[in-house]
Image: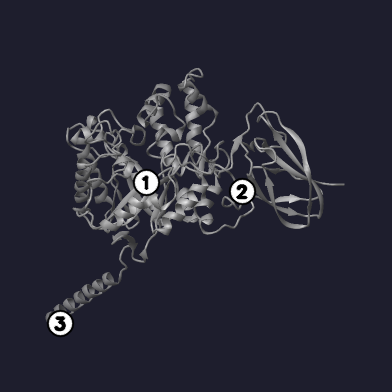
Amino acid sequence: MKKSLLFFAIYFAAIVLVGGAAVRCCTPKKDFLRAKGDRIVNNGGEVLLRGFGLGGWVLQEPYMLQLTGGIRTQTQFRDSLVALVGEDRTAEFYRTWWRNGIQKRDIDSLASWGFNHVRMPMHYNIFTLPIEQEPVPGEQTWLAEGFEITDKLLEWCAANKIYLFLDLHAAPGGQGNDVAISDAAPVKFWEDERNVEKAIALWRRLAERYKDEEWIGGYDVINEPNWGFTDPADRNGLNEPDNGPLKKFLVDVTRAIREIDKNHLVVIEGNGWGNNYNGIFPLDWDDNTAISFHKYWNRNDPESLAEALKNRTEQGAPLWMSESGENSNVWFTDAISLLESNNIGWCWWTYKRIGTPTPMEIIPGEGYLRILDYWAGLAPKPTADEAWAALQTLAENYKQQNTVLHRDYIDAMFRQVATTETLPWKKHKVGAIAETIFATDYDLGREGYAYHDLDLANYRTSDPREQGGNRGRAYRNDGVDIYAIPADSPIPDGNGYYVGSTEEGEWLKFTLDVTQSGNYNLILCESTDGKTWAKRNAGEVVFNAGEVPFEFKLDSRPGVNVAWLRFEMVK
């Protein structure tokens, strides 16, 4: 009997083991992104990355907050807040800023618009202390808050099946002389080996935490280093011929990650804000690495990609254009068309900020604007309570539901890349009752189809003379120049904006819903100085009932500002 029971126990154990093995062999492999030759792939094949950077969230670059003058870094901004409201309230402001800035609804929206990844620009100080504050020199103190923020973001990405790329945007000490982008300290990253050791330790810690997480897209190990290693006069490393310390860091940090994590893609960036790879190659220390480059304010022609494509061919590694933007919709459409025609994935910059261009514009509130005026020497110092109320409003307005969505921005990145078809911005009814049609509400679509403007985009790195786009930087992000109406010159029946800086040859297209055939007078609300507005009869037009495309030419009186137009039926 005992023998039979023993046999049964062994037989049952064998079934469990075999069954367990069967279950394991049939479990799908996790969907990690990885390099396969010069392409980025997952289990489903090649992946073309389309994403957005979350700049301004856990790392605040001053321009995103409209800061000027003496406030050049996040640390200086924080110190200025402490001087206004005290340390406790400042700490509470940052906790609220982080809580409000990116929520599940933000990631849900990005995924629904068509993006398949986000890039999280990380400040090292949400994860660990600066080297000067370490209780035991050379050791690392870990802060829970940064990891918890990242965990939550990863949870939302996984729920939407989009990838999260971790980007060390502010390395310990700051990785260059462009201090704003990395919140650089007086002693920079490259000037104290303890900073480098801390960065490597941080990546090792992140790898330990996320090595099995399939919706981590990869590790962007250092953002836009800009440092003259051999020539201090070459402050941003644009002409650096060697890049020895940068290569050593890239190799060392990759090896530290690979001791723990063999799964995830590692992303490297060159000197000179990400594009100077002199001395970095050959890329022979890891076969699961992508080569990043950034693209700002240059022309969208084959020459602008020549160096990156050369690197891809020679190194047999994939490319990722991990940062671009800050331009007009025309530039976006052209850049994405160029990148995707060369099988290069991209990540835009940035998702939210005060002002434009951005898909989600933060409205700062009058109180915060008064704080800015105080810092600029234009207004008296607010009380601590006034400043605190302003900061609470700013943080509340950081929530997605309180921002202004610029749908033309997203349209230019997806639909306009694929088609020249235009869509009505809104329904413009024309009939017996004359409805106001705002000049800013021309059709949604590509330049040359929805509108025509003569200075379309900012190409300043190709030609400093070409810094076009929307000169008024308001309402929409096309080449059309749209201005906010000053408070002291309101426009009767206006929407708060007008089309200005008009030039000969420019035009706007409106799709009209004509409910009654007939003759109509075109009435315009115009101004020659942007302050004094008057109505003018611009002539008679004839419409048949139905959907009618109407091209409104701006060249009859160039330089005139137009707020709105109406079609009044001729009696």
SS for dot 3 = helix
Image mark for residue 294? 1
Q: Please give the label number shown on residue 451.
A: 2
Amino acid type assigned to the residue bearing label 1 in the image: His
Q: Are marks 1 and 3 in contact (CB under 8 Å)?
A: no
Residue 85 in picture, x, y percent from top left: 42, 24
| Crowding at mark 3 (Cα within 10 Å: few <14, some 14-19, many 20+) | few
Q: Is residue 412 above or below residue 179?
A: below
Which quarter of the figure has residue 523? top right
Whether the residues at callouts 3 and 2 have beta carbons within 8 Å, the answer is no
Give left or right: position of 279 versus 68: left
Cα distance, mark 3 to mark 2? 87 Å
Quadrant showing the N terminus: bottom left
As measured in the structure, the alpha-carbon distance from the residue carrying label 1 to the one carrying label 3 is 71 Å
Which residue is pictured at 30% across the width and 39% down the height?
238
Q: Nearer the viewer, residue 113 or 556?
A: 556
Characterize the local packing of mark 2: few (<14), some (14-19) or many (20 or more) Cα atoms within 10 angstroms: many
What residue would you read off at disc 3? 4
Q: Residue at x 23, y 58 (%)?
A: 287
Tell whether 132 sits left or right of 522: left
Report the amino acid beneath label 2.
Tyr
